[in-house]
Image (spheres, helix red, strand yellow):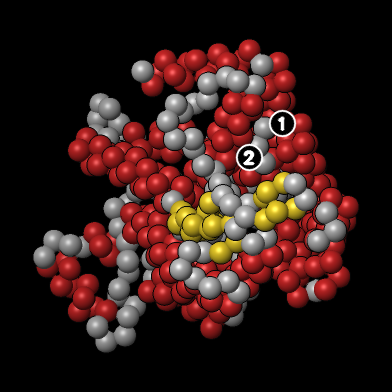
Amino acid sequence: MAEGLLTGSIRNIIKVPDLRTRILFMFGLLAVYRMGSWIPTPGVNTLALQQLFDQQAGTIFGFLDVFSGGNLRRLSIFALGIMPYITASIILQLLTVVWPYLERLSKEGQLGRKKITQYTRYLTVVLSLFQGFATSLALAQTASDPPIVPNPGWSFTLMTMLTLTTGTAFVMWLGEQISERGIGNGISLIIFAGIVVGLVPAVISLGQGLPPPLGTGERSIFSILFLVVLMVGVTAAVVFVERGQRRIPIQYAKRVVGRKVYGGQSTHLPLKVNSGGVIPVIFAASIVAFPSTLGLVFPETSWMQGMATQLQQGYPLYNLLYVAGIIFFCFFYVSIIFNPDEVADNIRKYGGYIPGIRPGKRTAEFIDRALSRLTAAGAIYLVLVCLLPEFLITGFKVQPIPLIGPAIDNFLVQYGLGYITTGLGVTFYFGGTSLLIVVGVAMDTVQQIESQLIMRHYEGFLKKGRIRGRRG
């Protein structure tokens, strides 16, 4: 039944010329992006660089490598990926709240949005130049055998800055072309492609953990099945929560304008459980990983090395700051993108009200209270999703906790629970930030394809209950 429905939907996509052209155009530009990811930046020993990333998986370089699809590990021409553009977009979005000029532009319709997009591009180039300079400096100063940069100097720095900035500008252009002439959000799809491309190596690595003759490891088939079931379960849970929302009912009074009667209908205000999306996780992970990166750039500073050690994945200080950062940025980001006072004022202007709640200030307080509760639940959900891969990979290392750390570790080992502090030694590929991005982008893309099919009177992917994207 489900297979026949999916086959019929794919057949309908092929029947629509415009939709077929858009999808083929999207795949074509994504293929160009993936081909460019194998073109290396001049002057870098890629083998030595890969060894460095294997040793420094918990730094911000390893975090950014996830979003670049492995380009940073190879230092290809697309090594910075689309992250400078995302950072520039977030900065301008935050400045829109505090800078009156940008706030006026945001309210001027399409012309104002074009101006903000232009400023975003300029800021992207500036950030790319800075990140290219910092990356070249960090690689040139990193001690390794063999050296990552055989011939360091200003020529290498300038070449790296020019190459990486040009690559980021080209990737930004690809994303804009996909959004305009393809299907889905181009920037999100580029990140999606970079993450999903590592799925096949992850599956191969998981299969190699089986004992001979199936693999080269010592894991039992039951443990592999447990990990597969866990991955599927976590993915299903993320889809369920990402689609979850609270609908606040709104009733509009009837208005008579001339000979026409307006209003009188009932609608709802949707409040998502995870309104901030993956942004809080990106902010928190970037800030927590920053000291580890400084320890990599300045290896001779002892106190910085000590801080970098305590902020490695699985250590108590890392987990504490990571969890606190996710919760803080959830509330901070939602408070910026959603203004209960403005929403309540708009509802009142159009003659609407929430049943049982007085319009104006009371409505704003009610919406703010409901949004705060949903944000708290969404923050807990993000924390659980992001800590699960940390537990599977490295475990929760309690040894560095003063006074009680060694005692807790001995107690767990004594009762056969040592895996809590050592981890299960596997890479839970679809976890944390990667899983949130993959699920969210897939839902958005399917929603847009289904909207195109329904608009042309074709049956979509789902017969009952249309799928809602992250903005649904």
Q: CA distance from mark 2 to mark 1?
A: 11 Å
Tell me where residue 49 appears, x and y as whole percent: 61, 51
- Report which residue position mark 2 lands on: 189
User: Any mark on residue 182, and which?
Assistant: 1
Residue in the picture at 50% in, 78% down: 307
The residue nearer to you, when weighing 232 against 69, is 232
The residue nearer to you, when weighing 162 against 170, is 170
- Position of 331 relative to 50 (above/below): below
Do callouts 2 and 1 mark residues in contact (Cβ within 8 Å)? yes
Q: Can the viewer see residue 254 in this picture? A: yes
Tell me where residue 304 appears, x and y as whole percent: 56, 79
Residue in the picture at 53% in, 51% down: 266
Q: Amino acid at mark 2?
A: Leu
- Position of 167 relative to 433 (above/below): above
Q: Amino acid at mark 1?
A: Gly
Residue in the picture at 34% in, 33% down: 207
Tell me where residue 63 appears, x and y as whole percent: 56, 57
